Every structure is written in C-alpha cells, then in structure tokens.
C-alpha cells in the first residue's frame, strides 16, 4: 500500500448530522415543501453548533425560490449573518454540497452545515417552453387576453412530473436507461430482487436495533422511515411487474427493486479541527481523505455507471484494494445499478480500458455493503440522499477501530457520480 495521500492541505472531517424520517410519496410528509421540510433539520443542527456556512440543495426546481439554502436558513429564524448558497448535482446534490464545503474550509469557515431535501410528492407543474413564451409575450401586450389564454391551456401545454424526472437529453427516465444497463451487464431479475430484500431486511434491523435513533428527528406526522418493509419476501418481490420496460417481456426493474418516490431532508457537518471542537463531544466524525467525481457518456456507458470510473481511480490513487475498505455505502437508485457498477469494477480489463487504471483490486467484499440498508428500503429524496449516506457511514464506521476506511458512492443522472474515501481517526 502506498503512503497516505490527502487531497486537502489540512484535515477535513465529516460529522454525522440529522435527517427527517423519509416518507412515502403522497404520504405523511406530502404537505411539506423542500424548504419547510428542511427547516427542522437546520434548526436542530444549529442548536448543537452555529455553522459558519450553509450549503443546501434540491433537485426538482421551484420557480418561486432563488436560493433554497438561504431561504431555509432564514425561514428557520437563524443568524442572518451566516452565508448560505445552493448546489445541485442530481442525486448527488448533498454529497456535492459536502465536497464543496470541504474545499472552502479556512479563512473563518471552520464548520459548515451541508445537505438537501426533496418533496417528490409535490413537484411543480411547469409549462412547456412554447406555452410559456406564448403567455409571456401576450401578458406584455394584453394582460386580459393572457389570462384568457391561461384558462384555455390544454394538457399538452404542461410538463408533467414524470417528464420532469426524465433525462432532458434522452427524454427517458433513469429506470428506462437502467433496463438497458442491466441487460448489458446480465443482471438478472432474481439478483436484483435478492439485493432489494437485503436492503429492506437491513434497514428494518437497523431501526429495530436503535441504529437510526440519533440520526433521525421525529416529526409530528412521521417518527421513522415509512419505506422499509418488514413483511416483504423474495416471493412478494418476484410477483411484481416491471415498472419501466412493460412491453418487451425482458423488463427486470420493478417498484420493489428500485428506490421509491420519497419525501425527506438530511444534513451533515463538514469541519476542520477547530470546527469539530465546536460540536458536542459525542458527535461521530470521520476524516474525509479524498474524493473523485466522474462523468461518462451516458449514451454509450450507462446513465448511472460513473461510479465504476470513479472508484478505481480513487482506490488506485491510494494504493488500496477492495479488502482495504471496511465499509461500502453505495446509493441504491436501483438494485441493478449497484450490481452493474460492482460487476464493472471487478473486471481488471474493463477498468484498464475505461479508466486507464492498471491495478488488481482483488475480490469485492459484498458483506461490507450497506449494513443498515440503502435507498431501495430507506428511500431516495434526490437532494437528501448524499447527506443521508454520509451520516449513516460516519456512524457505522465510528464504532470500528482507528484506521478503518469507508467508500461512499452516489450515482447521479446525466452520467455522473461522486465517490468519497473516509477514514476513522
């Protein structure tokens, strides 16, 4: 193994934060929006320590907000002298917030709150570009006529949520793309269902053991995650019909082996040594050693396959093999996505041809992945997932010996992905 490599000139830490329970789409949290759902999280975190900076994000756009981070902070009635700004990188939004904050430490910024939220139950209904231009032009000339035209809008004038979540360039959803990737990598329906079942079993066990108790605040409407199912089984998962490819007879992605529509908010801390000292003494934290952001041509490589490029590069930079990683926290957009990315990084020839990395990483350690469940069971509110993954990883590795390492991997729409290397100190 090579000598330790650190991306940052001084130690950077990720400390476990807080999140809301994650609610089912259309369920207990559907009356919130992304701002109001974020407010109790930043309030609870600020009660522990006032940050020097806030970076927050949400993926589904809302034309009524210019900067969700600042608006969350001010709605929380917190110190207006704390700056806040927003980021977005699809499903890796709050992970990107963390990496951005890590690079901004110093110069008076020692402690940052980072995170994000999504209320997928309440996506804004937008107009098509053509309808918007037609109305805007008309309002300038004849407001009364514009109002009449507004009342006369037809269904084709609206951009409905399902299209809003599709990739703009391809016009297809992540699930549509993942069906292709699953076939390319020969990921069977049975393997996907088996991984989904593990996700539920582990998430339920995590809740029952109390693992999540100090990571999740209680809301009046919901006290624990609504998605994990203690009554699911291989037979029930196998009975579900394909959710994306419904006509070819080859579809393998279902509602059961895909992450669900979810409402939730999550935050964590990014700090240097001075910032860590400001947090309560029992706050778990890990060192952020390094990270890698990758992007691929999603027309040819798969929309959610960027982690398979980032992971080998990150491991090789530190001379690490799979068995040097004690914990893997891999975002489960789909079971097929987890299985396909790991299948890719297990192939030395594929790694060399795609990433330029010539290394033997050994045998992948599946028993170290997502020990308390992942997004299939817990849920996937786009903007919150990265912070949820980071806090969960921090707590999981905090109980391990000093020197233990974790990889956190989050794929993102658009053929991108972020991967971080964390270490117990």
Image: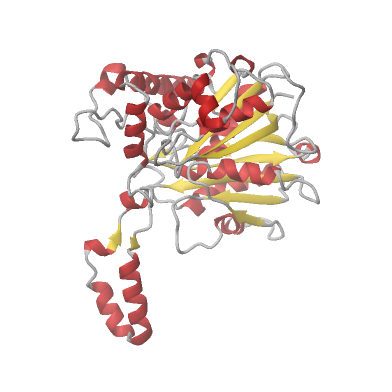
Question: Dividing the picture into quarters, in which one does residue 113 lie?
Answer: top right
Q: Nearer the viewer, residue 134 or 201?
A: 134
Q: Quadrant of the C terminus?
A: top right
Q: How is the image coloured?
A: secondary structure
Instruction: Name the side, left or right, on which 348 lies relative to 281.
Output: left
Residue 310: x %, y % from top left: 56, 32
Q: Residue furthest bottom?
A: 141
Q: Is residue 151 visible?
A: yes
The image position of residue 168, as x and y in percent, is: 38, 52
- Locate the N terminus by quadrant: top right
Q: Residue at x 58, y 40 (%)?
A: 95
Nearer to the camera, 107 or 301: 301
Coordinates of residue 204 in the picture (x, y in percent): 44, 22
Q: Of 417 and 268, which appears nearest the observer?
A: 417
Residue 381's quadrant in the figure?
top left
Left or right of 185, for residue 374: right
- In the rendered image, the vertical position of residue 197 relative to residue 146, given as above or below: above
| Residue in the picture at 22% in, 61% down | 155
Residue located 51% across and 31% down the image: 354
Q: Is residue 231 visible?
A: no
Foreground residue among 65 and 218: 65
Q: Is residue 139 above or below residue 365?
A: below
Position of residue 144 in the picture relative to residue 332 (left or right): left
Residue 352: quadrant of the picture:
top right
């Amino acid at each position: 193994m090579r000598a330790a490599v650190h991306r940052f000139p001084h130690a950077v830490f990720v400390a476990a934060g807080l999140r809301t329970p994650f609610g089912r789409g259309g369920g207990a949290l559907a009356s919130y929006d992304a701002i109001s759902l974020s407010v109790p999280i930043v309030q609870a975190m600020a009660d522990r320590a006032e940050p020097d900076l806030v970076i927050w994000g949400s993926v589904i756009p809302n034309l009524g907000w210019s900067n969700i981070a600042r608006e969350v902070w001010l709605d929380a009635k917190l110190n207006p002298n704390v700056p806040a700004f927003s980021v977005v990188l699809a499903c890796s939004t709050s992970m990107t917030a963390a990496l951005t904050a890590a690079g901004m430490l110093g110069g008076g910024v020692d402690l940052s709150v980072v995170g994000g939220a999504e209320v997928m139950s309440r996506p804004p209904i937008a107009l098509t570009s053509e309808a918007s231009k037609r109305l805007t032009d008309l309002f300038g000339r004849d407001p009364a006529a514009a109002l009449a035209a507004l009342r006369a809008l037809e269904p084709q004038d609206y951009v409905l949520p399902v299209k809003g979540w599709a990739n703009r360039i391809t016009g297809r959803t992540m699930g549509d793309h993942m069906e292709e990737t699953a076939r390319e990598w020969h990921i069977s329906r049975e393997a996907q269902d088996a991984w989904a079942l593990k996700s539920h079993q582990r998430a339920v066990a995590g809740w029952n053991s109390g693992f999540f108790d100090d990571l999740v605040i209680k809301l009046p409407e919901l006290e624990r995650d609504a998605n994990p199912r203690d009554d699911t089984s291989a037979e029930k998962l196998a009975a579900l019909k394909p959710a994306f490819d419904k006509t070819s007879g080859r579809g393998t992605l279902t509602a059961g082996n895909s992450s669900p529509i979810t409402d939730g908010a999550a935050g964590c801390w990014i700090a240097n040594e001075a910032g860590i000292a400001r947090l309560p003494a029992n706050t778990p934290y890990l060192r952020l050693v390094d990270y890698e952001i990758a992007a691929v041509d999603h027309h040819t490589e798969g929309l959610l396959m960027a982690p398979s490029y980032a992971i080998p590069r990150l491991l090789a930079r530190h001379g690490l093999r799979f068995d040097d990683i004690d914990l893997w926290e891999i975002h489960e957009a789909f079971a097929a996505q987890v299985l396909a990315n790991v299948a890719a990084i297990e192939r030395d020839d594929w790694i060399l041809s795609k990433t330029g990395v010539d290394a033997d990483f050994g045998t992948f350690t599946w028993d170290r992945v997502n020990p308390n469940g992942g997004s299939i069971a817990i849920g996937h509110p786009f903007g919150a997932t990265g912070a949820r993954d980071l806090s969960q990883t921090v707590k999981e590795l905090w109980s391990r010996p000093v020197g233990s390492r974790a990889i956190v991997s989050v794929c993102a729409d658009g053929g991108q992905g972020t991967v971080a290397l964390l270490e117990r100190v």
